[in-house]
Amino acid sequence: MDHELYADSAQARALDRRMSSDDDLHWSQGITPEEAAENNRAWLERLRIQNESRAASAKKVRLAALAKMEAMCGRSAAARGI
């Protein structure tokens, strides 16, 4: 039944063939431990930057909403919880 979800996907069929073969290749074949560690550090740095960007964006949205609320309801509206 699960295979029906990907019946039209050549990529999924190829992945199924690779995963079911006896000569399955490990994902890290051909990469040194040092390269894997560097890739991991780069990935973690990328995630950190994305998280910082999301947090900054969310803060801008909250500040804009607060400014709009204060403009519509008065300066103390946010403090009152309106």
Image (tube, grey):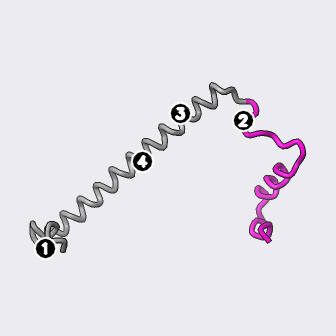
**Is residue 25 magenta-colored?**
yes
Q: Position of residue 7 (x, y in %)?
A: 80, 67
Nearest to N terminus: mark 1 or mark 2 = 2
**Left or right position of 76 against 13:** left
Kind of residue sitting beneath label 4: Asn
- The x, y position of residue 81, in whole percent, is 19, 71
Precedes in sequence: disc 1 or disc 3: 3
Q: Is residue 81 left or right of residue 20?
A: left
Q: Which mark is residue 73?
A: 1
Return the residue at label 3. Answer: 41
Q: Mark 4 near mark 2, Cβ–Cβ under 8 Å? A: no
Q: Determine which of the numbered discs, if any, sits on residue 28 in the image.
A: 2
User: Which x, y percent locates residue 37?
Assistant: 59, 30
Of the numbered discs in the image, which one, if any, rests on residue 51?
Answer: 4
Would you place residue 21 above or below residue 75 in this image?
Answer: above
Mark 4 lies on a secondary structure that is helix
On the image, the x and y values in percent for residue 26 come to 77, 39
Give the distance between the C-alpha atoms of the residues marked 1 and 4, in whole angstroms: 32 Å
Rounded to the nearest angstrom, the CA distance separating label 3 from label 2 is: 16 Å
Magenta-colored span: 1-30
Question: What residue do we see at 38% from left, 48% from top?
Answer: 53
Identity, as a three-letter code, of the amino acid under mark 2:
Ser
Q: Residue furthest right?
A: 22
Mark 1 surroundings within 10 Å by alpha-carbon count, few (fewer than 14), some (14 through 19), many (20 or more): few
Asked if the residues shown at circle 1 and circle 3 are in contact, with their CB atoms under 8 angstroms apart, the answer is no
* Crowd tier of the residue under label 3, counting other residues whose Cα lies within 10 Å: few below 14, some 14–19, many 20 or above: few
* C-alpha separation, residue under disc 4 versus residue under disc 3: 15 Å
Say left or right for 52 vs 73: right
Q: Quarter of the image containing the C terminus?
A: bottom left
- Residue at x 69%, y 26% (from the top left corner): 32
Q: Nearer the viewer, mark 1 or mark 2?
A: 2
Q: Report helix, strand or loop for mark 1.
A: helix
